[in-house]
Amino acid sequence: MHNPSVFRSMHRERFGADPAIFVAPGRVNLIGEHTDYAEGFVMPAAINFATLAGISPRTDGKIAIYSENYGEEKTFDAAALPAKGNKHWSDYPMGVVSILKGEGHKIPAFSLSIWSDVPLASGLSSSAALEVATAIAVMDLIGATYPGPVLARLCQRAENEFVGANCGIMDQFISVNGKENHALLLDCRDLSYKLAPIPDHVALVIANTMVKHSVAGGDYPTRRRESEAACAVIASHRPGVPFLRDATLEDLEKWGHEMEPKSRMRAKHVISEDLRTVAACEALLKGDMKELGRLMAEAHRSYSRDFEGSCVEADAMVELAQDLPGLIGTRLTGGGFGGCTVNLVEQSEAAKFAEALGVRYAARTGITPQIHICHASGGAHRLE
Ligand code: GLA
């Protein structure tokens, strides 16, 4: 139903008012995994899967939120908002409302409808798309505006502080600031960024292993703690290293023996991934697809072996793509432990590639994957 007029009628029928409609995309990360919360580099692109949010004012003091995906409506008292989430889909929109209130905005009564085609729990940032769509809808209603990077931070805080998931800034940032046909190299320290065009002849093929991934689950925070513990060891010798962004592979050589072995491996991934990510952007800007593919392969190995952030199915998806015609580069994308691989593929081969990969993966794992041929899309905005 990526059809705003159907969405509009749905909102009108349920809430008896015409909504203003906003859209926020999901994302695929080309390279730079678990580097964002270490103030490092990431290079995602927004994709043509998105969340719609329709909003209209009410007069009864209530906030009503309807999710078409869950077929469920939740109602809150605008004057008595919850302070924390309770493990429900409505935590994401309500987290944003709560953060906006904390920023000093008076929150009025409203009806909000939500619909999304971003696959859930697949590492494509359905949560960030929901947060950002809600944020720009509510901001429009209350007449608030924020620069893109600030808006992304507010949405990240909704997830950190209200939902209770310890994510970094990447997903919200790209959902707000993505650009059609471009990848975005983000410096997660100062939120400065560089856009790199994705050539027309390259398709983004996203292959869903169908193994569920969640940032709120145990593995993501465990990996984060392990890599931060390694950073603390380095910082005890070299105080100028508050984040792994500031560390070098030489630091690991020198002080790695003082770290838990797992911590050392996580840090090796993060430190080397920052270098690869910056190099990958240069390769993309130069149109050196071969080098980009090589860096993606190295990134996957590092993510899987040193970070232990992959799973059997995602490793299989990467391996089975290797010799298919048209492949430029492939790796597991997103928070890890399942979800999707991102494949850069020659456009002319993309359909055949997708089909062959699906057949191979099903034969190997017994799981029917979902494989989508996508393109890089623009960031969140109002639909007229
Ligand atoms: C999830 C988080 C991001 C980032 C990635 C891993 O998508 O939401 O902040 O940490 O995992 O790169």
Image: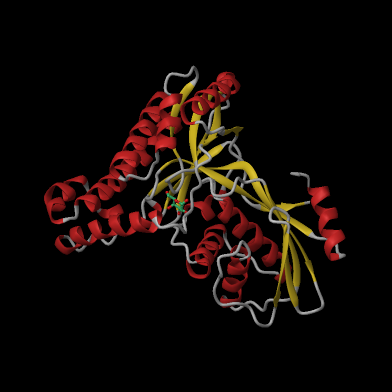
Q: Residue at x 28, y 54 (%)?
A: 244
| Percent coordinates x, y for residue 106 in the rendering | 67, 79
Q: Quadrant of the N terminus?
A: top right
Q: Residue at x 31, y 60 (%)?
A: 225
| Percent coordinates x, y for residue 359 in the rendering | 54, 23
Q: Is residue 197 left or right of residue 294?
A: right
Viewer-proximal residue among 36 and 220:
220
Q: Residue at x 44, y 36 (%)?
A: 313
- Total tally of numbered discs in the picture: 0
Q: Residue at x 54, y 59 (%)?
A: 152
Identify the residue at the far top of this view: 325
| Coloring applied to the structure | secondary structure
| Percent coordinates x, y for residue 272 in the rendering | 29, 42
Viewer-proximal residue among 378 and 356:
356
Q: Is residue 342 left or right of residue 176?
A: left
Viewer-proximal residue among 91 and 152:
91
Residue 288: in sight, yes or no? no
- Residue 300, placed above or below residue 125: above
Q: Is residue 220 left or right of residue 163?
A: left
Say which quarter of the image contains residue 155: bottom right
Identify the residue at the far front of this view: 366
Residue 212: in sight, yes or no? yes
| Percent coordinates x, y for residue 20 in the rendering | 78, 59
